[in-house]
Image: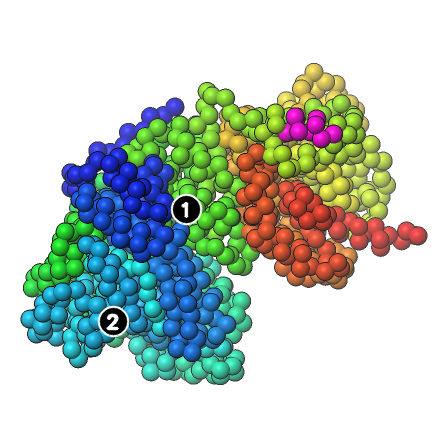
Amino acid sequence: MHEFEPRSPSESSPPSPPSPPAPLEAALRRAVRGEVAFDATARALTTMDASNYRRVPLGVVTPRDADDVAAALEVCREHGVPVVPRGGGTSIAGQATGTGVVLDFTRSMNRLVSLDAEARTAVVQPGLVLDRLQEAAAPHGLRFGPDPSTHGRCTLGGMIGNNSCGSHSVAWGTTADNVESLEVLTARGTRLVLGRGGRGAPDGLRDLVGGELKLLRTGFARDLPRRISGYALDALLPERGVDVARSFCGSEGTLGVLTEATVRLVESPPARALAVLGYADESAAAQAAPGLLPHRPLTVEGMATDLVPSAEGLPRGGAWLFVETGGANGVEARARAERIVRAADALDALVVTDPAAQRVLWRVREDASGTATRMPDGTEAWPGWEDCAVPPARLGAYLRDFRRLTAEHGLRGVPYGHFGDGCVHVRIDFDLLTAPGIARFRRFSQELADLVVAHGGSLSGEHGDGMARAELLERMYGAEAVRLFERVKDLWDPDGLLNPGVLVRPAPLDAHLRFAALPREPVDVEFGYPADNGDFRAAVRRCVGVAKCRTTTVAGGEVMCPSFRATGEEAHSTRGRARLLHEMLAGEVITDGWRSEEVRDALDLCLSCKGCRTDCPVGVDMATYKAEFLHHHYAGRRRPAAHYAMGWLPVWLRALARTRVPGIVNALASVRPLAAVAKRLAGVAPQRPLPRLARETFTRWWERRPRTGVHPRGSHAAGPAGVDPRESRTVGPAGVEPLESRTVVLWPDTFTEYLSPSVGRSAVRVLEAAGLTVTPPPVLRPGGPRIADGRTGGARGALSVLASAVRRRGRVCCGLTYVSTGQLDRARAVLRRTLDLVEPVLDAGLPVVVLEPSCAAALRGDLPELLGDDPRAARLADAVVTFAEALERHAPDWTPPRLDRPVAGQTHCHQHAVLGDAAERRLREAAGLTGDLSGGCCGLAGDFGFTRGHHEVSVACAEEQLLPAVHAAGEEAELLADGWSCRTQLDHLAGRRARHLAEVLAEALDEDRPGKD
């Protein structure tokens, strides 16, 4: 096992808190009714937010209420330990990290206390996720104005702490503009209610402000809508209403701890339209943005082509403005959007009124904070200068100067953001791993700060200063204002207890970088990680903490992250697991490397659905990381029983099938005492019925299948056009006769072979009806003349059989069950044997039709990553097609039978994440099967739902989307589920039989067969 070599702690790291953890933990447990966690998992999960920074806390407290917060503050003050309030952990400047005690508000103090629709206000606790407030306000035609792209997981407390804004700030302002009053606790336990007219100001604040009126009137820009940096002390001016609540917004947890907030709501337009305007580049788009503001749009968002996966369907141009308008109805909203199009000096434009199409476009914009972490060539890019802002009229000029400065430093970044407010988001390809790279990061930050100030801007325009920019505040405000910030901090928090090192008396901007603790050398791993240059450290670094995996609802068929939605625990989110893997590599909090039980337990509830591979903006593939970890964790040790029972499922099913008594096996499995013993020995959940073996395997059906005659293309008869599919021959050396160009190889995956062969039979029926010649893969290793399935015709075929008689017969296998249980040595051996068997297929260039989505995904994804040194692996991965893809690509003129009925069911999670389902959608549409299948994960997920201890989570995943969709479907609806797991879950939990699309089409063909009656 590879030993990690973490870096030495940075010399600039602060000393450990004076109080040892044990007495502090004991005191907190006595004083606080909420959860107190000082274990490695809790600490590891909170070392980072969404920034470049990492600070290791002593422990985490989950307060139940304000009394708990006060008690925790008192204990920490007595022990001299800092306190860091934390919401969703999506802060980008490092302010949600700390070395003392973290107060996690997301698990208990997360309620909507009340909503007054008439007064248009809501009372919220700090841990309430923004989307929950929006959902409660929507029936009243209201909403909270600010809406960061992380609205599905950011909390109101975090938004107030950072003075967050979002895309609609041109219409509804920042969080500070929408706060009525705040209830806070000072570090010394004083309870204050902050509001206008000096309400709630701590002793001495008004006098301090009164002595600095000139500075507050001249040192704070008024024409900058996104001035978020520093303390908003100008809100305390008499002419601005001495608004203490507003001045508290953006203080980043350094002045007091928020326990409750009263916020203002705004009227939400009943209808919206989206004008998409195309420009040559982002500077041109930025130049045009201020001219659209007089038309009172709801948004003016800018994005360049670098961040758009595909410009198909967008107007011509290299950059776009997304300008949203509202109205009392669709006609009014569209008319306003069209007025903006006429007023805009754009290369091209379109107006989108369909809500679904608008959501697709907005999803691209919201995912940009993650997408931007990878340059087009795969290079890593990081925050640090994520959200500076300049006056909107200066944005175009600023972006040109920004591009020039990055080029001078040899850096690259992709600007995007809130162009209507002059706020730019950008992630830059800083080298934060080496000393020269970090030195350049510092020099660039200083020069860019000067550039922003020269354009009259703010170092932060949305996410706060944290540790990323606070060191540079003097360049923006001057020394006198920064000293005033320090005096204000000391007045609120005289003991320096709250979030030290942030905003005031900050840590250096190049200290506490989160990569410093990672091993210096690459870690020995099994998968190839081609997108990360084979470096597991880089793969783990992919997670930047934007936490899309923490959303509690999904839309548009998305999957990620079903285990988090089932448990609500950070450790069961993709981000949480990535954090634990990061800390495992760092070796400071989690010290036992691959043997870590903390990482094992967090990964245990990962369904390996691969949803994160597609839905995560940065493409984290936790299923692969899980398989990698399990391989190392159990190396040389006994594995759980389920790994042997279900990991080796192909072996056991094949052995049982050879007995030729599946009926007896099924009968024994139905005897409860026997089944209970078998499930206990196999590590199977007691709630699950054991799978039933098919009475006849697909291969046996194929071997006894009668030879067929000539059947013209499109005929409903079983045989292909004049060719016996069992006697098809492949291309090989020495002039072996080639197969027909319309031949496809049907892959007998384990599930189709032993558990649901009707899917295979149906696929053969449909593929042949479409005019394709179907053949199974070879079963003999090559070495002599090539053969297709061990049965070739003629003398040459007979000689081939005789010459191969002593060779061992084998079966192809995708290795899925071995991969999912982390038995990667075994998976590699099985896949090499498979490549040996299918080499003639690869030489012939034949498509390989795989009916089970999880097996197809394993061949397309896991195979080339495990056997990257074997060129045949990539060839097989490229040859794999799904059932619908085979028909679309190789029988494009075939028309499926019309069924004209609605459908319900689920798109397999691996289909969504790895394969794509566009061909399946088109095939269903051609067959008249209407409606969309649900997203999410069925929860069975191969071995996951069968494994002891997983049943509750498995059911919760099914209850999220699949079961409601099926229950809502009428009796006339066709239940579709191409995955064996999805069909089995429906059978177990809903008592409904779903079918593979091939089965549905085959049945329709048989019903249409002439002379059927």
Dot 2 alpha-carbon crowd within 10 angstroms: few under 14, some 14 to 19, many 20 or more: many
How is this picture coloured? rainbow
Q: Is residue 313 left or right of residue 149?
A: right
Q: Secondary structure at mark 1?
A: helix
Q: On screen, 643 above or below 1003?
A: above
Q: Amino acid at mark 2?
A: Gly
Residue with the most extreme front position: 30
Residue drawn where x is 19% and y is 38% of the image = 19
397 vs 614, nearest the viewer: 614
Quarter of the image for residue 679 reads top right
Q: Secondary structure at mark 2?
A: loop
851 vs 540, nearest the viewer: 540
Residue topped by disc 2: 195
Residue topped by disc 1: 570
Looking at the rendering, the stretch of residues picked out in magenta corresponds to 671-679
Is residue 395 visible in the rendered image? The answer is no
Residue with the most extreme top position: 806
Quarter of the image for residue 385 reads bottom left
Say which of marks 2 and 1 sits in front. 2
Dot 1 alpha-carbon crowd within 10 angstroms: few under 14, some 14 to 19, many 20 or more: many
Residue drawn where x is 59% and y is 51% of the image = 959
Q: Is residue 8 left or right of residue 807?
A: left
Residue drawn where x is 90% and y is 51% of the image = 1012
Residue drawn where x is 72% and y is 60% of the image = 970
Using the image, tell me which numbered label, if any, was put on residue 908: none
Q: Amino acid at mark 1?
A: Glu
Q: Is residue 673 magenta?
A: yes
Residue 116 image offset from top left, x and y in percent? 42, 73
Residue 917 image offset from top left, x and y in percent? 60, 52
Q: Is residue 697 left or right of residue 545?
A: right
